[in-house]
Image: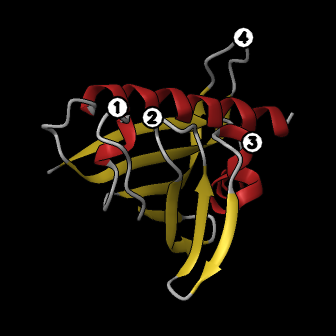
């Protein structure tokens, strides 16, 4: 098993990033519309990317305000779906405030920003969808960055 990793610098306060990761409403703005359900095993977030993938169910494992969000994929998916290797994997978002980051635009000042470290732990690197999912997560996290940064303008 291996871990998919990404790191994203977001020009927004940690609280905004955390809100976008920790609520069904927030996640729905940058990934897919989430339906939250309280179960005997805790909160489960659910979305349906289409019949070829099946319903994605993510059990919320941990919420540490402004610091960490962790989900476990508890759904199973058809063999031909890129989500087929997700069952049992953990999606972990570590959020850290960074000070004095050099600005990358025309603004020569230092900025305060948030570093988001993402990992999907327990991924079978032999999966035919490993590279696809690695790239897809990069794109999804860039969408998160765009959405959160546009909300702070």
Which disc number belongs to residue 106? 4
Asked if residue 149 is positioned above or below residue 45 in the image, the reply reads above
Q: Would you say 113 lies left or right of 7 here?
A: right
Q: Nearer the viewer, residue 113 or 8?
A: 8
Q: Residues within 10 Å of mark 2 (few under 14, many from 20)?
A: some
Q: CB under 8 Å between callouts 2 and 1?
A: yes
In the rendered structure, the answer to whether residue 3 lies left or right of residue 115 reads left
Q: Going by the image, does 44 lie left or right of 80?
A: right
Residue 23 drawn above or below residue 8: below
- On the image, the x and y values in percent for residue 146 come to 69, 29
Residue lying at 51% horizontally and 46% vertically, measured from the top left:
116
Do the numbered discs 1 and 3 sit on residues whose CB atoms are within 8 Å? no
Q: Secondary structure at mark 1?
A: helix
Reading the chain from its start, which is encountered first: label 2 or label 4? Answer: 4
Q: Which mark is residue 134?
A: 1
Q: Is residue 50 visible?
A: yes
The disc at residue 29 is 3
Secondary structure, mark 2, is helix
Report the front residue among 78 and 59.
78
Q: CA distance from mark 3 to mark 2?
A: 15 Å
Q: Mark 4 or 1 closer to N-term?
A: 4
Q: Tell me the distance, in whole angstroms, between the alpha carbons under discs 3 and 4.
A: 28 Å
- Is residue 135 positioned above or below 99 on the image? above
Circle 2 residue: 137
The location of residue 127, given as percent across then percent down, is 19, 37
Q: CA distance from mark 2 to mark 1?
A: 5 Å
């Amino acid at each position: 098993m291996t871990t998919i990793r990404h790191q994203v610098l977001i020009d927004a306060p940690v609280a905004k990033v955390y809100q976008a990761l920790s609520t069904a409403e927030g996640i729905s703005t940058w990934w897919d519309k989430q339906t939250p359900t309280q179960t005997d095993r805790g909160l489960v977030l659910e979305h349906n990317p289409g019949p070829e993938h099946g319903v994605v169910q993510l059990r919320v494992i941990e919420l540490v305000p402004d610091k960490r969000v962790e989900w476990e994929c508890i759904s199973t998916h058809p063999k031909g779906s890129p989500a087929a290797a997700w069952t049992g994997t953990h999606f972990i978002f570590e959020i850290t405030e960074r000070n004095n980051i050099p600005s990358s635009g025309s603004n020569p000042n230092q900025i305060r920003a948030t570093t988001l470290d993402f990992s999907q732990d327990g991924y079978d690197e032999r999966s035919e969808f490993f590279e696809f999912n690695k790239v897809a997560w990069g794109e999804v996290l860039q969408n998160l960055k765009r959405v959160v940064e546009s909300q702070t303008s």
